[in-house]
Amino acid sequence: MNDPVLSRTLAMLAEPGSTYARRFDRTSMLDLSVGEARYPIPQTVRSEIAAVVGDLDTLWYTNPTGDIGLRQAFLRHRFGTETGRLDPAQVLITAGGKEAALLAVRYLLTRDGNTTVLAPQPGWEPYGMWLRAVGATVIGYNPTELAVDAEGLRRMVADAHRRPGLLILNYPHNPTGLDIDQSHMDALMDAATELDLSVVSDEVYRAFANKPSSAAQAPAFDPHRHLVVDSCSKWLAAAGLRVGFLYADADTITAITGLRATYASCTSPLTQAVAHTLLTNPVATAWLDDVRATIAGTRDALAEHLTARGVPVTSAGGLYVWCRQPDQPLPPVSEPAAWLTDGTGFGAPDHVRICPARAGLDPRIAADAVIANLRGQ
Ligand SMILES: Cc1ncc(COP(=O)(O)O)c(C=O)c1O
């Protein structure tokens, strides 16, 4: 039997530069590649987590839609006390944002019966892999241009050979770090609605935006057509926890929960309890506020050092600094090379993505280690 989705995925993993074929074994290099916030959990926060975990008296199968307390906490965090926005039936808890995004994309492709998709390019590698694996037609758009020009969406749809059915948005954006303000998000959602596009808005970096915006806050937002993805991974510095969120209308959540339950019985109650603590406990939230401020400072300082040293920084935001390979040779440095993410997997082979969200990182030393990599040292 041939499963075309698996065969195409295996073929993509064998392509040169495929990020997901990598192994986590380059321990001797400074790792500025993996896109996560790496800050050890302080003892004060660990004690809060230990108290909660120590109180769990069962580890049975739990609600396949996710713990109701965590879903409510997520909604309160997202929408404050906005009435009409706090229905936990509109949230599915998944094993990370990656699973939430995969389910959202594949569900909408099937429900809408349209496999022509507008996706950011450069963009997060899995979108392209999933879409190619199912035989979808991908129309890449420039996320920097679209962020400020909703008309661009109308032009792209008008120019497309086949009418697109799905738009994937990802602001703040991986790999460029690019942000979008709410008025531009509103304009994009207006245009998407007018063009009859379904939307998956992947907002896993939202907490790192200067002024966080969301598709769910747009006046045109329709939770039946527009699905929002979020995750604890980046925002709560807890990527290994594997807790993500999908926000949509209750019928869509019910359908996707059923699909998920065929291969994953529930999300672990243990990790959901830890996520709830990180999201709501004041000791944990104070620590995470500090972590996010540190990340922004380190990232901006690194971008400045790199620019001063002749590295063309295209953009910086969220967890990332996004650089073009320099045209001129860079002067030698004494630091050993850092491990960076090559832009090929994102669809931009002339770029590299740097994730400086590392505890204790000295931006000056990190800049040298980046230059050593770019020089091929
Ligand atoms: C754009 C984007 N979406 C979703 C994810 C998924 O994160 P996770 O599955 O760790 O929650 C990532 C992680 O790199 C990402 O960059």
Image (tube, rainbow, N blue to C red):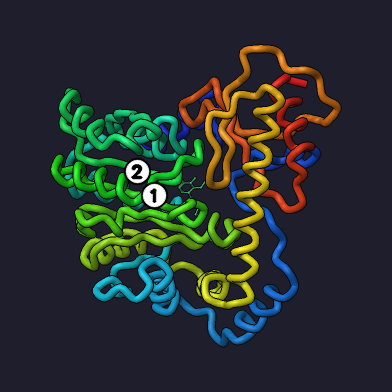
**Is mark 1 in CB contact (under 8 Å) with mark 2?**
yes
Query: In this orientation, does residue 156 appear?
Result: yes
* Image quarter hosting the C terminus: top right
Q: Which residue appears farthest toward the right when viewing the image?
A: 334
Q: Distance between the residues labelled 1 and 2?
A: 6 Å
Front residue of 334 and 306:
306
Query: In this orientation, does residue 3 appear?
Result: no
Circle 1 SS class? strand
Tell me which residue sits at (13%, 43%) in the image.
Answer: 194
Q: What residue type is labelled 2?
A: Leu
Tell me which residue sits at (65%, 33%) in the image.
Answer: 340
Q: What residue type is labelled 1?
A: Asp
Q: Where is residue 97 in the image (x, y as percent from the top left)?
A: 45, 54
| Residue 169 numbered mark, or none | 2
For label 1, count other residues whose C-alpha is less than 10 Å away and answer few (under 14), some (14-19) or many (20+).
many
Q: Which residue appears farthest toward the top when viewing the image?
A: 328
Q: Where is residue 219 in the image (x, y as percent from the top left)?
A: 21, 57
Q: Does mark 1's beta carbon lie closer than 8 Å to ligand 1?
A: yes
The image quadrant that residue 121 belongs to is: top left
Tell me which residue sits at (43%, 70%) in the image.
Answer: 77
For label 2, count other residues whose C-alpha is less than 10 Å away and answer few (under 14), some (14-19) or many (20+).
many
Q: Is residue 171 left or right of residue 108?
A: right
Q: Position of residue 215 (x, y in %)?
A: 31, 53
Figure check: 203 above or below 288: above
Q: Is residue 15 left or right of residue 111?
A: right
Figure check: 192 above or below 72: above
Q: Where is residue 105 in the image (x, y as percent from the top left)?
A: 31, 46
Circle 2 SS class? strand
Front residue of 52 and 323:
323
Is tag 1's residue or tag 2's residue first in the polypeptide sequence? 2
Q: Mark 1 points at which residue?
A: 202
